[in-house]
Image (cartoon, rainbow, N blue to C red):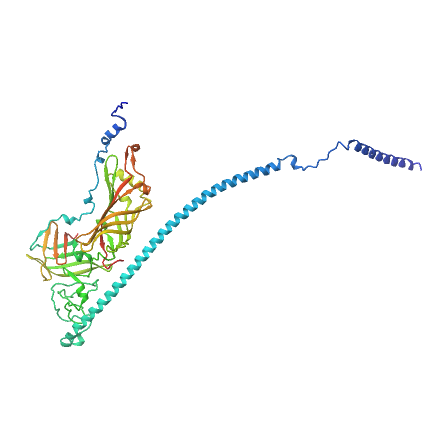
Amino acid sequence: MKREHTFGGWRLLVAIWPLFGFGGCIGSNVLAHEQRLVAPVVAELQFAPAPALPLVGLYESVLITGEVALAQRKVYYVFQGDGTYTAAALVESDGQSAFQTLSGTWRSLAAGLELDGKEPVPLEQAPGHVRITAPNGSLVLRAETLR
Amino acid sequence: MVQSMPRKLLQWIGVAAVLGLLAVAIGALMLVKDRVTLVLQAEASAAGPDPVALLRDDVQTLQRELGELRSQLGGNFEHLGAALEERAVARHAELQASAREVAQQHLQQQHAAERAAAAQLLSLQAELAALRSSLPVAGNRVPAADVSPGVAAGPTTEPAPGQTPVGENPVGQNPVGQNPAGEPSVGGNVPAGPEPTPTKETPAAAKAGSFLSFSVPAAKFQFDQSQTYTLLSDLCRVGFDAKSTLHDFTGVTGKVAGRFVADFDDPAGAWTGEVTCEAGTLKTGVDGRDTNMWEYLDAPHHAQIRFELGKFEATKVDVGARTAAGTLHGRMTIRGKTRDVSMPITVATDSSLRLQIEGQMPLKLSDYEVPVPSQLGGTITMQDEVKVWIALRARVQVGGAR
């Protein structure tokens, strides 16, 4: 028995389906496996050494790495033009969070950032960000403005 | 005499009439005595139905009603049995949850007690070390009257210009007061003279560290011990991949929350906790489809999709690298229906010491009584089975399991 196929009925409906405004649905819209995990914004930053960088301004941490990241959750620095700074860190211990505050002196040298006259630590720069690297962790700070 | 005659006559006539009537009556009775049947019948029965028939009808009605009651009673017993069974299952689940909660609280209290004891020990050791180090100073350089709490006692052994922590130190370090004049100083309110130089005799100082002039409490990421992890909502995603007649798509949400207690080196793999997401925040990129999806998930009435952690069956654990792989067993609740599930997962740790947990598993919508979407009379249909996946980041709670 010979079957005659005609381009009509439901086949036609399926064929013209995209023409009725559903064209955007066609094609796979599946999130790739490697894109499921939220990527931190700082991962895309390209840091370069920033000797003697004029740091004056307000900075907020966006990433803390290393063992210190277990307890230190957030850091703010205000580097002032007169060579002083004030800072606050949110530190967690035994399930309780509390701010520590500091004030002291700073200098941006060729060797990096000197805080309170101690050994300078490497200082790097990316657009809108700086990275300070200490022996037990690093701190990525984003430049902020006081509003 | 004349008047008494008619009276007597009348008396005789009356007697004769009575006797005559009596004779007629007797005669008539004799004639008809065999033809008369005396029937005594209740007055009401003459007009009403047959009582026996009524009684029979009543019995039949009662039998019929009894049969109906019997059949209904059987159904009701079945319903009652099902309800009791459902209640028993729910009660069992409640009891299990309560038992887990009690166990978790017990664990938390135990850890808190251990930490408190350890902190007290460290404090005592620090005080002892401070006393030891201050004794020769007090004896040689500082008058006894000057050694009092809250009084600065000279320069420090390690000058650190500019370092002036302000306020109460939350981590049990030696508090360092701010110099009223704003001058850099250390040891403003350290009792008993100069700040001791960290040595092996001061374990409290040795335990703590500093990071860019901040004091940081000693904290270890103990991958091989029971610890509490809190999901970082901003860095978590859960979703599903679905296939339909026309194309494949992903539904995803970042509204994820949860906490869990896990020990990756525990052979029993007993994990507790849960991960939840908001059903009404799942999005596929097509508004109309999202609206239908929320309706299918009955998001207004079952706002949360919940995954209750049960057991981690590890296939690979590297404590040093802080990585693991295995199968996570638990109970998934969607649209109010709870089913046992198993999800293969991988665990890694990023540079900020946050856990990265990724996994996926197949899931049938029909198992949770979620209608499978279909459009145009079934021309466009979605497959019943979807791939559910998680991509989570969690931070360990400093201070151990809680």
**Residue A134 or residue A34, whichever sits in front:** A34
Give x and y (percent) for residue B350: 18, 52
Residue that appears at 60% across and 36% down: B53
Q: Is residue B371 above or below residue B114?
A: above
Give x and y (percent) for residue B225: 24, 58
Count of marks, rendered view: 0
In the image as oriented, which residue stretches furthest toward the right? B1
Give the quarter of the image for residue B210: bottom left
**Residue B149 or residue B372, whichever sits in front:** B372
Give the quarter of the image for residue B399: bottom left
Give x and y (percent) for residue B391: 22, 47
Give x and y (percent) for residue B23: 83, 34
Give the quarter of the image for residue B279: top left
Residue B97 in the figure: left or right of residue B391? right
**Residue B267 or residue B400, whichever sits in front:** B267
Task: Answer whether residue B176 is visible to the viewer in this image.
Answer: no
Q: Is residue A36 above or below residue B8?
A: below
Q: Is residue B57 above or below residue B277?
A: above
Residue B380 in the figure: left or right of residue A126? right
Q: In the rendered image, which quarter contains the N terminus of chain B?
A: top right
Q: In the rendered image, which quarter contains the C terminus of chain B?
A: bottom left
Residue that appears at 32% across and 56% down: B101
Task: Answer whether residue B208 is visible to the viewer in this image.
Answer: yes
Q: Is residue A60 above or below residue B145?
A: above
